[in-house]
Amino acid sequence: MTVPLEYRALADRFEAIRAEVDRTPDALVPRSIMRGIAAGLSRAPSLRRNDPMKSHQQRSLWGRLADEAAARPEQVGFVLLGEGGRAELAERLGVPHRTLTARLDGWRRTRPRLVVPYSGRRKAGGAPLVAVQLPAVSDLVLWAATVRAVPDAVDGRPPHPLLVADAAERLAMLDTRGPATDGWPDLDDAVEDLGAAIVRKGGEPPARRLETGRRR
């Protein structure tokens, strides 16, 4: 399988974080966090105002692509494809080949880019699609891994995965980078602040997975 150099670089960063704390990928960034990232991308308030996302069909396809990109933390936001290339991805997403081509072309032209398609070496039939990256997923997976790798200053344990998932979902909705934190209280504050930012953008914050009971 041909993989982009960009994937190798990000995957190596994730592996370095994982190896440092000697945890499996799923223990470092559990499924709850990955689901939060995918859900946030599908619920971003900006989607309905974005030309390539104004129809329900396009937003539905975007949600399925986000699920694929967030399937495994070690994929760091990439959907890696075999020899089937674009046809393989179209089948996985349940759309015609031409529809997928048109959508990817529109999404890669946004600023910032929603997707980054990668092609392999050109052959007789053209350059095959070998991978699609969702940069927002890449950023949030690495952020979550970094946050979960640092023992909490309060209790000496990694921040609870559900608290990280709450933050990651809201960050994905806002398409913004994760904040630096010194402990779970900082993360708890960030969840509340991000929820307020979502409201200001005309969206509705998702229900929290973890209620800490803490007051600021």
Image (cartoon, rainbow, N blue to C red):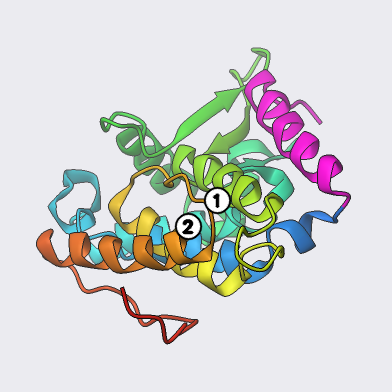
> Residue at horizontal 15%, vertical 67%?
199
* Above or below for 90 versus 12: below
Q: Residues within 10 Å of mark 2 (few under 14, many from 20)?
A: few
Q: Is 21 inside the magenta-drawn segment? A: yes
The circle drawn on residue 68 is none
Please name the residue that numbered disc 1 is placed on: 90
CB-based contact (under 8 Å), mark 2 and mark 1? yes
Indicate left or right for 28 with 42 as reference: right
* Above or below for 119 versus 83: above
Q: Quadrant of the C terminus?
A: bottom left
What is the magenta segment's predominant secondary structure?
helix
Please tell me which residue lies in front, 67 or 172. 172
> Magenta region: which residues?
1-22
- Residue 202 locus on image (x, y percent): 11, 65
Q: CA distance from mark 2 to mark 1?
A: 5 Å
Residue lying farthest front?
154
Please name the residue that numbered disc 2 is placed on: 95
Indicate left or right for 30 with 139 as reference: right
- Classify residue 129 by image quadrant: top right
Q: Is 37 inside the magenta-drawn segment? A: no
Q: Earlier in the sequence, mark 2 or mark 1?
A: 1
